[in-house]
């Protein structure tokens, strides 16, 4: 029963989710909209509880066992608690019961710590920092990958070199036709490759979804079969 009930639930909801795309009838579309607006919210709420519980359990075990970089788990848990309190009691638009602003006496300066301000001043800079580090890793990987070992690698190296040079304003002003060539590379060959990848990803997703709905693939149950 522990395996049959999850398989039955996945089969029923998988079929119900696919029917609105196959039968565009008004009654079916209204039922699908009602399902998305009510049932999915309940599922998301349970998923949020499971996700938060999993994070707390993971970092608690990491702190208890003194694993590598366990000190950062304190930062994660404290940040989770603070952001949850501010978000729940302060409100998303700073209209909750918890005051999320402080006016310094004898000045007009207002210190805000609502959830949107925390996101703008903490998460956005951290995200920009991570993407900046990612750019260096991508550059290092490109240096190792873009080597003219064969004709395909030579074409890839030449195309990447042209696109990167065309993105520099000084180079594009000296060689104005370079930008048109770069645009052609991004529009024609790049788009063709992206469409091929898109078709492959779509077909792979459909095949995997059908295998899960029909019970052929059962690895998500936590076992091997």
Image (cartoon, rainbow, N blue to C red):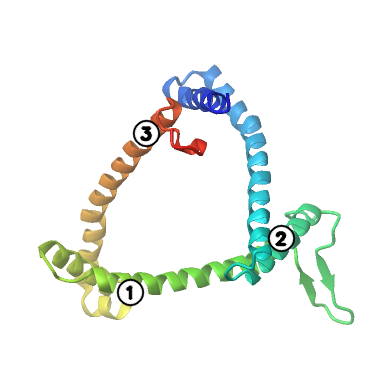
Residue 97 is at least partly visible in this image: yes
Q: Which residue corresponds to the image point at 75% horizontal and 67% vertical from the top-left?
A: 113
Q: Position of residue 152 (x, y in %)?
A: 14, 61
Specify whether 219 is left or right of 156: right
Q: Position of residue 171 (x, y in %)?
A: 26, 79
Q: Which residue corresponds to the image point at 45% horizontal and 33% vertical from the top-left?
A: 218
Mark 2 is surrounded, within 10 Å at the Cα level, by few (under 14), some (14 to 19) or many (20 or more) other residues, namely many
Residue 166 is at least partly visible in this image: no
Q: Is residue 107 above or below residue 62?
A: below
Per the rendering, the mark at residue 140 is 1
Q: Measure the alpha-carbon separation of dots 3 and 1.
A: 35 Å
Tell me which label, 2 or 3, sits earlier in the chain: 2
Tell me which label, 1 or 2, sits earlier in the chain: 2
* Front residue (pair 66, 218): 66
* Front residue (pair 76, 184): 76
Indicate which label's residue lies in the foreground, 2 or 3: 3
Q: Position of residue 123 (x, y in %)?
A: 60, 66
Q: Which residue corresponds to the image point at 36% horizontal and 69% vertical from the top-left?
A: 138
Farthest residue in the front direction? 65
Quarter of the picture holding the N terminus? top right
Q: Measure the alpha-carbon separation of dots 1 and 2.
A: 36 Å
| Residue at numbered disc 3 | 206
Q: Position of residue 117 (x, y in %)?
A: 69, 65
| Residue at numbered disc 2 | 115
Quarter of the picture holding the C terminus? top left
Q: Measure the alpha-carbon separation of dots 2 and 3.
A: 38 Å
Specify whether 211 is left or right of 142: right
* Front residue (pair 29, 210): 210
Q: Which residue corresponds to the image point at 25% horizontal and 62% vertical from the top-left?
A: 183
Specify whether 101 is left or right of 213: right
Judged from the image, the secondary structure of the residue bearing numbered disc 1 is: helix
Q: Is residue 106 above or below residue 158?
A: below
């Amino acid at each position: 029963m522990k395996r049959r009930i999850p398989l039955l639930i996945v089969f029923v909801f998988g079929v119900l989710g696919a029917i609105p795309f196959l039968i565009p009838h008004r009654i079916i579309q209204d039922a699908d909209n009602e399902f998305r607006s009510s049932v999915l919210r309940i599922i998301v709420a349970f998923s949020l509880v499971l996700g938060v519980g999993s994070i707390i359990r993971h970092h608690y075990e990491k702190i208890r066992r003194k694993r590598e970089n366990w000190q950062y788990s304190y930062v994660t848990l404290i940040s989770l608690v603070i952001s949850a309190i501010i978000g729940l009691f302060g409100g998303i638009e700073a209209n909750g019961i918890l005051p999320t602003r402080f006016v310094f006496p004898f000045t007009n300066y207002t210190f805000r710590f609502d959830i949107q301000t925390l996101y703008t001043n903490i998460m956005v800079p951290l995200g920009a920092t991570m993407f900046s580090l990612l750019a260096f890793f991508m550059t290092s990987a490109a240096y190792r990958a873009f080597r003219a070992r064969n004709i395909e690698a030579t074409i890839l190296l030449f195309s990447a070199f042209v696109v990167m040079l065309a993105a520099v304003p000084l180079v594009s002003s000296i060689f104005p036709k370079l930008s048109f060539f770069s645009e052609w590379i991004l529009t024609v060959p790049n788009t063709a490759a992206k469409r091929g990848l898109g078709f492959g990803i779509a077909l792979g997703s459909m095949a995997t979804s059908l295998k899960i709905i029909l019970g052929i693939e059962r690895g998500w149950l936590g076992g091997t079969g």
